Image (cartoon, helix red, strand yellow):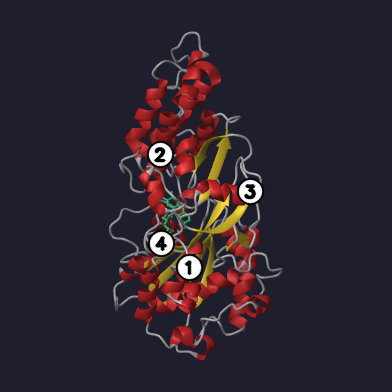
Amino acid sequence: MTLYGFSQPTHWNGQELPRIISRLFDVPDGHRLEVARRHGAYATIGPALFDRAPYEIIHEVAESGLRGRGGAGFPTGVKWGFVPRAPGKPVYLVINADEGEPGTFKDRLCLTRDPHLLIEGMICTGYALGVRTAYIYVRGEMLPQICILNQALREAYDAGLLGERIAGSRYSLDIFVHRGAGAYICGEETGLINSLEGFKGQPRLKPPFPAVSGAFGAPTVVNNVETIMAVPYIVQHGAKAYRRWGTEKSPGSKLFSVSGDIARPGVYEVPLGMPFMEFFALAGGLVGELLGCIPGGSSAPVLTAEETRRATMDYESLSSLKSMLGSGAVTPFNTTRDPVLILQTLTRFYAHESCGQCTPCREGTGYVDRVLDALIDGHGGDGDVDLLKSLADQYEPMTTICAFGPGAAWPVQSFVSKFRPYFEAYIAKNPQRQRTRDLAGVRPGAFW
Ligand SMILES: Cc1cc2nc3c(=O)[nH]c(=O)nc-3n(C[C@H](O)[C@H](O)[C@H](O)COP(=O)(O)O)c2cc1C
């Protein structure tokens, strides 16, 4: 996949754009401690943090309304509040840098351009939660990012910003980088914890939730890279300043990675609540005439052009359209594209990445993929479009241990219902109008 960079102007429509996460993204060598410090890095590591009680930091983050940027949008302060006080066990912080969803490429840019902001956010979070040991779980393929991260950690240790008694305070923190093996399911927080512990990366049943019993049986907070990178700003400037951006229920800014039929693909930090059409203009404009848009990563139900035109980039607007903001990966496509082929790319991905633990997901994703392949190859029959939907309907309603099943079903359900004529057109190409490829001979779950 092409890795697009940061393409954002400082202002848009006469208004300053937020630079909470991306402040150093276009500063040359901003990933080096010396340069980062010249631009204000680690300003919180001193009285701003250590003169306050940990619960005050949790309260400030809760007040800011910051929501998790890994996909689910769960309020961060609320999640932190689930960690038991005095649990009698260590509390772990685990950063989810497994980013593997098609179209999502913001976290790898964060790690490349400003690893010190993540480290600073981890120190603030670790202090708030009483964490002594923290992990960053990074997708295995992200080798350049892992090297940059390790270099940044070395710099931070050498400067006394990590390890024993950080910056002369009574707080100590160690951070370890754990390299994954490139499985999408290890981005799911309990699959990630299993993998971190050295087990097969398969999700665990919840409850217990990780905040109560996670890594090594101890309370564990799993947060996305971008989520934690917003924390230093909130600690330094306060919840009110953070709420200057965004909407009442979706405060702050968010990184969006946009690809597809757009003139300047890349990563942008914009206030939540921005209309999608304005965002497209900011990213250089749409290429061709809009047919539809995947608004929040490959699991997010697709929007039609008309829905996209009235949608804004916040959690509430997209849930009112029965879609989601997810990881903030926006993929508009134009009328020269075939939605059936777009869906095929997604079903192939989900069939390949299902961990195989739960029958509806393991069998269903593979089955859908084979029916769709047959249809595209001219072997589809009457009823196959309904079959696709009914199969997806069976692994959608949380009949599985984790949310992979629903996330794999939503694209199928939404593409089929919103772009049905495109599917029917493939069947019309088959003169027999009944499936002429026997799927029974194909091994179920052919990809895992
Ligand atoms: C199949 C699947 C894959 C996921 N992949 C990621 C991922 O790559 N990165 C991430 O931060 N969250 C991912 N999540 C969400 C995590 O389970 C979890 O909600 C998140 O890391 C919590 O952090 P947040 O509250 O800061 O968003 C995934 C969830 C599922 C179901």
**Would the CB of label 4 be found within 8 Å of ligand 1?**
yes
Q: Nearer the viewer, mark 4 or mark 2?
A: 4
Residue 187 in the image: above or below residue 58: above
Judge from the rendering whether residue 212 lies leftward or rightward of residue 133; answer left or right: left
Q: Earlier in the sequence, mark 1 or mark 4?
A: 4
Residue, far bottom? 168
Which label sits on residue 228? 1
Q: Which residue is under mark 4? A: 67
Q: Which residue is under mark 3? A: 265
Q: Nearer the viewer, mark 3 or mark 1?
A: 3
Residue, far right? 28
Q: Earlier in the sequence, mark 4 or mark 3?
A: 4
Mark 2 surroundings within 10 Å by alpha-carbon count, few (fewer than 14), some (14 through 19), many (20 or more): many
How far apart are the alpha carbons under marks 1 and 2? 28 Å
Residue 26 in the image: above or below residue 85: above
Residue 423: where, in percent of width, then height? 48, 23
Amino acid type, residue under disc 3 in the picture: Pro
Residue, far top? 431
Q: Which residue is under mark 2? A: 410
Q: Do the CB atoms of the residues marked 4 and 3 lie less than 8 Å apart?
A: no
Residue 446 in the image: above or below residue 431: below
Amino acid type, residue under disc 4 in the picture: Arg
Observer-nearest of 414 and 201? 414
Residue 197: where, in percent of width, then height? 43, 62
Q: Earlier in the sequence, mark 4 or mark 2?
A: 4
Q: Nearer the viewer, mark 1 or mark 4?
A: 4
**Would the CB of label 1 be found within 8 Å of ligand 1?**
yes
Amino acid type, residue under disc 2 in the picture: Trp
Residue 92: where, in percent of width, then height? 41, 71
The answer to whether residue 40 shows anywhere in this view is yes
